[in-house]
Amino acid sequence: MTAKANTERRDPAVPAIELKGISKSFGPVQANKDISIRVMPGTIHGIIGENGAGKSTLMSILYGFYRADKGEIFINGQKTEIPDSQAAIAAGIGMVFQHFKLVENFTVLENIILGAEDGGLLGPSLSKARKSLIELEKEYGLKVDPDAVIEEIGVGKQQRVEILKALYRQAEILILDEPTGVLTPAEADQLFRILGRLREEGKTIILITHKLREIMEITDTVSVMRRGEMTATVKTSETNPEQLAELMVGRKVLLRVDKQPAKVGKPILEIENLRVIDETGVERVKGIDLTVRAGEILGIAGVAGNGQSELLEVLGGMRPATGTIRINGQPLILEGTGSDGQSRRAQGIAHVPEDRQREGLIMDFHAWENVAFGYHHDAKYQANGLFMNNAALRADTEAKMKKFDVRPPDPWLAAKNFSGGNQQKIVVAREIERNPDLLLVGQPTRGVDIGAIEFIHNEIVALRDEGKAILLVSVELDEIFSLADRIAVMFDGQIMGERMPDATDEKELGLLMAGVAGEAA
Amino acid sequence: MDFLTIIQVLDSTIRLSTPLLLACLAGLFSERAGIFDIGLEGKMLAAAFFSAAIAAVTGSVWLGLLAGTVASLVLSGLHGLASITFRGNQLISGVAINFLAAGMTVLVAQDWFQQGGRTPSLIGGGRFSPLTLPFAEALRDVPLLGPIYYELISGHSILVYVAFLCVPATWWVLYRTRFGLRLRAVGENPAAVDTAGVSVVGMRYAAVAICGLLCGIAGAYLATALQAGFVKDMTAGRGYIALAALIFAKWRPWQSMGACLLFGLLQAVALRYQNIQLGDFVIPVQVMDALPYILTVVILAGFVGKAIPPRAGGEPYVKER
Amino acid sequence: MDVMPKWAEVILVPLISLVLAAILSAVVILGIGEDPIAAVEIMVNGALGSTYGWGYTLYYATNFIFTGLAVAVAFHARMFNIGGEGQGMLGGLGVALVCLYVPWPHWTIALVAACAGAALFGAAWAAIPAYLQAKRGSHIVITTIMFNFIAAAVLNYVLVNLMRPAGSMDPATERFPAAVHLPTLHELLLPLGINFSKSAPANVTLLVAVLACVAVWALIWRTRLGFGLRAYGHSETGALYAGISPVRIIMISMLISGGLAGLMAVNSTMGEAERLVLNATEGAGFIGIAVALMGRSHPFGVFLAAILFGFLYQGGAELALWTKIPRELIVVIQALVILFTGALDNMVRMPLERLFLRMRKG
């Protein structure tokens, strides 16, 4: 199979891609089980499924990033071996990964030619790429500065570079893995317009997502994956979100959390003029004011990277800041001694961090050690002045596992051996069971299956109903809508405005998330 | 200090900088590709021994150079096997290579020559002889520039000139060629290289091989040009100093040369002023011995500030989870 | 899921690595024209065939327990301390100062004081690289290596210019007073009716080393500090989240590590030489790396690996005596052990994992 084959006129009845019986295991985990799929040329084909359903693995196999254990791949009707990405590129396939594969300190141009250079010297390659970049810009409206350094441009632009990389390599088939996760709704719309244009030009597009809305909006056909298997392929026009959700999860799903109106009490958390400057000297939080009261969930909406993470990290004692933060009227120390996570815990703050694998858990520790993680100085976990009481700790772990339905309920299992949902349950159990005055929650359901999502959402609401204050940060607008009693939108380190969930909609929040200030902001 | 003394110290600086520079550039290729290498020391040592041994046996310094380079390349291959193919800890692999070289060189030296872990002294064609550059003799008596040209620039072995020519060559390869682009990319984000259809493993092995080649020349220079034969542990921490120079230079070629010249100067001064008393104040010989190492620490602690190593450095590339 | 059962992880993997290292060592011995089987016989006889041999084996093992523990403790906090050699040298200085300049009434008190001195000096020598790592981000591997060279120069200066007795040409201190003589295994075991070799240097410090193993085990797995140390070693961001101070962990782990490395001098300087000499560490600091890797950073593993290396060291000395195999063979074996148990770990592990996976599936 050569690149030339792609330029021949295709028969519209022959699938652009056909996968037959693809299986793939990572160690003992089977990520793809005997998957077959046909993608017709000139269409946008959606692949939807929960986190961990095996969508990304399947597409990584098609792109030669992983090798399938079993199965066959046909491109335009011809059986094709794809042992590496080189072969995929030669077969006319391009892929935009969820985590971009760009060299951060290279320029746009250098990233585009990497691996597709002409000859041993860089000079001619660079000028050729510069020329074709101008053509591609004209053709598809994909504008980027070729000499900008990747780490200095926004994620939306970086994604364009990824698309341009694929087009520069003359891709006829473009795979996009969760492309809107880092985009504002407006940017996502723009991306979909570009994808539509690519479809008009006859390109074939595979869109991997877990967002039903995107599937309904842009795809022609949709395939549903569940637990490594392909459960259905249907025409988008002949289905609806409820049916897709049921196919994804395997049972009927409640899309909204059932909750009583909030009984709001006195202010627990008061933030005034908070500023955060990061290690590289960039101001990430630019003087924000916020209040969270007892018995309410304040949801912070916003596109990732607009200062929400830094806000959580300051409150959790992971990062210095300036300004004033009071909890129950007592000021928090924001820099130096007394500003660490231990001090925060002592002041009644519990923290479910955004990244459980890198922060909330030690993946190689046993479950029982993780239950003490952050609280290993607690008196109840000590045997005496010298040693910890590991037996008490294990008993405590068993109790928490039972209460939060962690599976398997084995305190000796290492954290890395639990599924994403059960890992998150361990973190949530640990933090909620502290009975904190203020609970910080970052992306509580990222990479968590729907069953665990319901459980975790209900636990958070239950804590609210006990009269605790909760600060929720999430990039999922659906989650914000279903949990928050009040919504604040962050953009570029500032609060763009606060809204009540029943007095706003996705469109208005989307504008705020993109930095377009509303009238009341 | 008179003019001639200064010239002599600087002349010795150049000679002492040469092995540091070669090792430093060797490390640069490896680390820019994301493979940390604290085994520069061991590779140099192995090359020093095998070059001296083969030169002593055959009487040909060129065969010696070849043998030394091959020995260094073998150790490079081992480092590649451990850190690229088997995704092991690169620091530990480097440590192992240093010990392997330290032990094997003495073991083999004792077996071949029975001289307590040395090689016989090299004479004649067994050593690299100084090259006299054109017009050096004629210009010798020109004031100021004459001695500089004759003493300082001319009269080094060919490997010295090779080492210093490697600096612009490295710059050119790194920033002006496809190979250099891919090499730098693989040290920053190997996944980007992989998804662009270029073999990460291939690039990294290539980088490690260049590292071995340059370390081989460095070691051969030590035993067959700077000195006349191999003695036990003759690298004396030069591999580590080269690493410090590399960090000091923030992994850039021209700056590497500057850093190596600085460390070379330090060694030259230490060598010259071993037992010299400065007025009433005596600098103990041990202070001069320790000075390069102390300076390395000072530089690592203070002046480097934010030396950001290649982002994927030290981490094996694992594609599958 | 873990692919391999725990026993395979803990026993099988190191054992296979060890066998590979042994095979290659045999090849090396063959290469220099000697018989590996005869060599092993000489080593076993020389190191384990008599109480004299055992006395040396255990003496070396005592050194290696300390330096192995030193590396292991640092490993748990993901610090790679290659400075055991220098820290051991400075530990020797601490021991010498304690033994020479204080009139001790009894060896027991002297032993406690010497341990304190050794640990203090070793820890102090580790403190500077630790501080530079914690506060300035200077790579601890390179700074500790540099500190080995600097330690050698310091010791050289102290011995040649300051502590050398007048008239002596030897760069060493004078002999320690008889009151600080540590009982050897011969003296300790005689009351029990066991006649252990009189001339072997193994001494009461062996018991201190065993105690150190227990103490390190308790520290790592039973205390809050150990919890924080291991957490930091596994995940720096995780430690930050949990409020575990990286600076504190780096400093404390390296101070403990340096102190343990320093303690080896109690054995070598006070127990054996009874005076401070140049190069008293004899590379034990480096062997600690191999010992810690082989022992999987677990105190019990370190203990076993230290005995093995004690055997290799004593056996190697016997080899050098009776054959034309130089002592550097030990350095080669040490390198091979580090290579196979450390760097090439996956070479052994990956095929084993595949094997266990296949067995499980069926």
Image: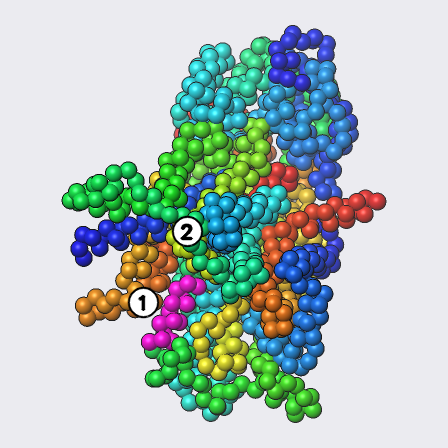
Q: Is residue A149 left or right of residue A87?
A: left
Note whether residue C345 is visible: yes
Chain part drawn in magenta: C148-161
Q: Quadrant of residue A259?
A: top right
How far from the left and from the top, in percent, is residue B220? 45, 49
From the image, which quarter does the C terminus of chain B lie in?
A: top right
Residue type highlighted by circle 2: Gly
Q: Position of residue A451 (x, y in %)?
A: 70, 38
**Which percent across, then down, holds residue A372?**
60, 58
Looking at the image, which residue is at 67% across and 71% down? Answer: C43
Q: Is residue A208 above or below residue C335?
A: above
Which residue bears the numbered disc 2? Answer: B124
Asked if C361 appears above or below C174 in the picture, the reply is above
Chain to which mark 1 belongs: B
Front one among A337 and C115:
C115
Q: Where does label 1 land, which residue?
A: B285
- The numbered dot on residue B236 is none
Residue drawn at 50 percent across, 45 percent down:
B63
Along the line of sight, the residue nearer the viewer: B131 or A506: B131
The chief SS type of the magenta part is: helix
Q: Which secondary structure, mark 1?
A: helix
Where residue A7 sits, quadrant-wise, is: top right
Residue occupying image coordinates x 51% and y 70%: C282
Measuring from the top left, give residue A173's x and y in whole percent.
62, 18
Say left or right for C304 vs B184: right
Taking the view exactly as shown, the residue that stands out farthest to the left is B143
- The answer to whether residue B216 shows anywhere in this view is no
